[in-house]
Image (cartoon, rainbow, N blue to C red):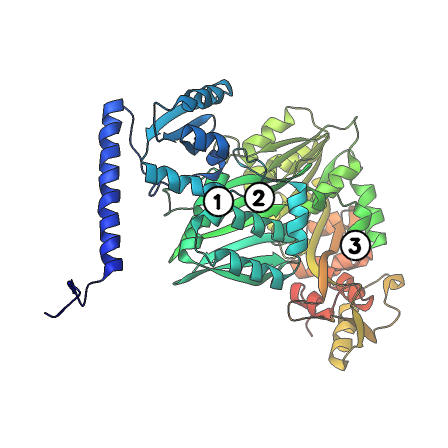
Amino acid sequence: MRYHGGMPSNFDTDAEDAKLAAVRAHEEEDLTRILAEKYGIPYTDLAIVPVNMDALRVISQKDAEEAEVIAFEKTGRHLQIAVRNPQNDALARVTHDLESQGYELSTFLISAASFNLAVQKYKDLSLASASKDGVFDVSQEELASLATQLSSLASLRTFLAEATESGSHTQTSRLLESIMAAAYSMKASDVHLEPEESAARMRFRLDGQLTDIFSFDQHAYRQINSRLKLLSGLKLNVTDRAQDGRFTLALGDKNLEIRTSIIPGNYGESIVMRLLDPSSIQKTLDSMGINPKLLARLREEIKRPNGMLLNTGPTGSGKTTTLYAFLQEIYSPETKIITLEDPIEYHLAGIVQTQVDNKEYTFASGLRSILRQDPDVIMVGEIRDAEVVQTAIQAALTGHFVFSTLHTNDAAGTFPRLADLGADPNSLSSAVTVAMAQRLVRTLNPETRTMRPTTEDEREKIQKIFASLTDFSLMPDSIEQVGAANPQNPDDTGYKGRVGLYEAIFMDEAFGAFLRTNPSTGEIQKEASKQGFLTMAQDGVLKALAGITTLEEVFSVVDIPRD
């Protein structure tokens, strides 16, 4: 071996320094363990155990440094603290203050290195001014700042790329706040986190359409996953089965409820967060895009002393929002309204809302209990089985008005579906007063939309769609032009917001007699057309001809008559 200056030519000083530092660190942790036994205090290492940012916030950085104490885990009023020196004079004052605030303390001993590492996390405290259990509290000023900064997909992607560049897990709360603030400002209804082999894809549902936003590495995804589980009240160590939870995003003087759903997948847990914005249900019936003729009839029907209105459509078609609008329309101090939901998505003032637990308080048992509360109006979140059908029908026949939802393709499918669930066809004509159906379509951005000529094929389709309409006053004046999207940049779709397409069948003596012949869905559609109201397809085409939406949107959600 050749030597130079008394040192081997292949001597790696950096590697040796690292080894020496590791030995010293190990020795320091061993010494801390010995001291922990001496003081009778459990030992921990904050280089391994994660520091919960909500816990860290309980003790100010100034007090933490002075007393050499770190709050690293918080569950309700139980607080776990790690101390560097149990004999520190300032420690007694800090612990006394915590106990006077109602905290139950569990104390652990840590090394100087562990303490110094934890103190560094203060600089990465989230933007939130405070965060209670299950509440993500963002100041109005910070939200406004984030909303302005992250108002476009491009700016959000740039922000997330820069925020994750360091790879530091201490940025997790700040990342999550930015994601939620951006989702809120862009009016996303859902945030999806989907782990793949080497990354986790994040998508927003904007105006009903899933849009790719960003890909996190697996480390960042795991940190976000853990933070969301803690916020949502879910079990961190459960990864092989589905879990559902919720938390609140406190936005100044209003709260945004976040419903979290987690299911296991091949490469990790798939996460969906649904944003339930209370302002989205403040819509009046007049603002929902219901055709004036249909709206006038619906207003008459929902004021009946008894009966049943069923709103149908697939998941995410806005059925519950419409029912909430009905409830707000008919609410008065003299009217007792009780709901049975799974879960309660929005809180309505002046209305008694209850939530099923699918164990003892089910839709069936809950509905029976509600009837003993002497309500005038009942809303059942969904009719799922024969027992709920029978109870709801009995309620509608005995002096209550019942609102509920059903999964069918159209209004005509309501009656065969109820029969499939065990309802007596002879009772349907007396109980069900309205069968509705709806879909949601994206609306064109009013500032950028344009009109385009219809094609020959489109004109033929439109003529077929309106062939069954018996009220000629609802016919379009012209079918020569329809709305068209006019995107301004690669991330712009040309759409902004959504509107409903609606149809309804109303029970009368003739239609009730017709139902007793056990007709098919197609026969029900033909009979219902005699009532002179628009079908969803006709409603959608009229909106496209008015430039509110596009034919492409309408034809993507409704059935078109075949030859």
Residue 369: horizontal and vertical position, in percent? 59, 27
Residue at left offset 37%, top offset 37%: 115
Foreground mark, 3 or 2, reads 2
Residue at left offset 47%, top offset 37%: 233
Kind of residue indicated by mark 2 = Leu
Residue 224: horizontal and vertical position, in percent? 46, 49
Tag 3: Cα neighbours inside 10 Å, few (<14), some, or many (≥20)?
some
The secondary structure type at the circle numbered 3 is loop
Q: How far apart are marks 1 and 2 (CA)?
A: 16 Å
Q: Considering only vertical position in the picture, is 106 above or below 557? A: above
Compared across the picture, whether 62 is left or right of 187 comes to left
Q: Distance between the residues labelled 3 and 2?
A: 39 Å
Q: Does residue 537 show up?
A: yes
The secondary structure type at the circle numbered 1 is helix
Q: Considering only vertical position in the picture, is 260 above or below 340? A: below
Q: Considering only vertical position in the picture, is 477 above or below 180? A: below
Q: Which residue lies furthest to the bottom in this view?
A: 456
The secondary structure type at the circle numbered 2 is loop
The residue singled out by tag 2 in the image is 127
The residue singled out by tag 1 in the image is 228
Compared across the picture, whether 235 is left or right of 429 comes to left
For marks 1 and 2, the one nearer the N-term is: 2
Total labels drawn:
3
